[in-house]
Amino acid sequence: MNIPSLSELYLQFCLFSLMAVGGANALLPEIFRQVVEVDKWLGGAEFATFYAIAQAAPGPNVLIVALIGWKLLGVPGALASMIGMVTPSSIIAFGVGKLWYRFRGSPWRKAIERGLAPITVGLVLGSGCLLLTTAATGWGLYAVAGATTVASYFLRHNPLWWLAMAAILGALGVV
Amino acid sequence: MNEQEATVHPSRLELFAGFFQIGMAGFGGVMPHARRALVEKYCWFTEKEFIDLLGLGQFLPGPNVGNIAIVAGARFHGWIGSVLALTGLFLAPFVIVLLLASLYRYYDDSVVLNRALAAVAAAAAGLLLATALKMVVKLERRAWVMAMLGLTFVAIFWLRLPLLGILAVLTPVSLGLGWYALRKESKQ
């Protein structure tokens, strides 16, 4: 494993930030490809665990980014990766925010929204499948993932319930 | 500001505190909480404005909620507002997630904890899959939309291609098709 410097870490996540069309969930496969497969900063199982921790904690799922930085360089690393993740996108959002209201009814905006939608959804679907194949290492875990998918799709309970149930089943050694 | 559109104008402290609360509340996805807080609880935005804001947050690169914090903050207090809203949003979750991870590292060798976490990771994957499926169902049922969806999925998941390349090739095509579909409809 090649440990990056703080500035390398910051710049890497600035780059991710610019590619995050469709938010953090759409970006997971790219982060996985770069951080696990190319840089080998962490293992696949560790990646899935970090995602689970970020999901179980309050706040946006993008916090998996902070955990990657934390693993490599401690709290400064967590800050570097997290700040990198929001720097370029925030500058763009600040600039574009005003324009957006002006082009409210514009056909350009509708075309962009419609055109980007299938790409975003394809990326999020890819994220889900990637996490599934990484996290589900046995049939029991596949069953947990499948049951959670169905439950969360059809029922409107707080997702924390499904995570808690999985934790209990896991701790008891059922799955 | 127009009476019907304009709602409550928060102070800097209120802006920070509001987004702090949104960050804390957002178990498993922040967006529903953000809507409830910004539209119903604080009345900083009307429903229509929020939908508009959501569209922007999704269209821009970067974390969606983060983008919403930036634009909302800027609307009320310029760039200082943006920084306050963004910091408020991420402060508590950032600390909590690091505390959880430290706990995990400390009890790293516990078999029970590792089994529990493995199951939670599988469940978290399930949650994300459900989110993705809900998005798929909402898409327009058109051949080009499904084709772009399929191509993107195959490229990122099966072929494991770099995202930058995928976006560089597929985005212009998809935007063009979106534009073409819109023009065809407006002619009819």
Image (tube, coloured by chain):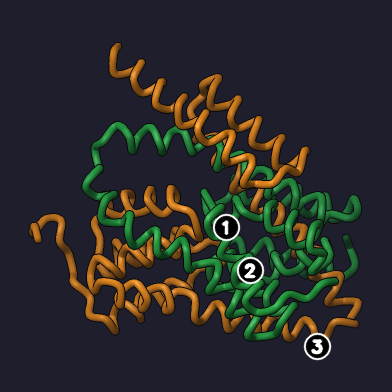
Q: Nearer the viewer, residue B169 or B179?
A: B169
In the image, which disc is placed on residue B106? Answer: 3
- Residue type at mark 2 is Val
Q: Is residue A171 above or below residue A175?
A: below
Q: Earlier in the sequence, mark 1 or mark 2?
A: 1
Chain A: drawing colour: green
- Residue type at mark 3 is Tyr
| Mark 3 vs mark 1, CA separation in Å | 28 Å
Chain B: drawing colour: orange
Disc 1 to disc 2: CB gap under 8 Å:
yes
Asked if labels 2 and 3 share a chain, the reply is no
Asked if labels 3 and 1 share a chain, the reply is no
Describe the element under mark 1 as helix, strand or loop.
helix
Describe the element under mark 3 as helix, strand or loop.
helix
| Mark 1 vs mark 2, CA separation in Å | 9 Å
The C terminus of chain B: image quadrant: top left
The count of marks equals: 3
The chain to which mark 1 is attached is A
| Mark 2 vs mark 3, CA separation in Å | 20 Å
According to the image, label 1 marks what residue? A24
Q: Residue at x 56, y 52 (%)?
A: A19
Q: Is residue A37 above or below residue A58?
A: above
Query: Label 1: how many residues lie within 10 Å, few (<14), some (14-19) or many (20+)?
Result: many
According to the image, label 2 marks what residue? A65
State the image coordinates of residue A155 (x, y, percent, origin top left): 58, 50
Describe the element under mark 2 as helix, strand or loop.
helix
Query: Label 3: how many residues lie within 10 Å, few (<14), some (14-19) or many (20+)?
Result: few
- Residue type at mark 1 is Ala
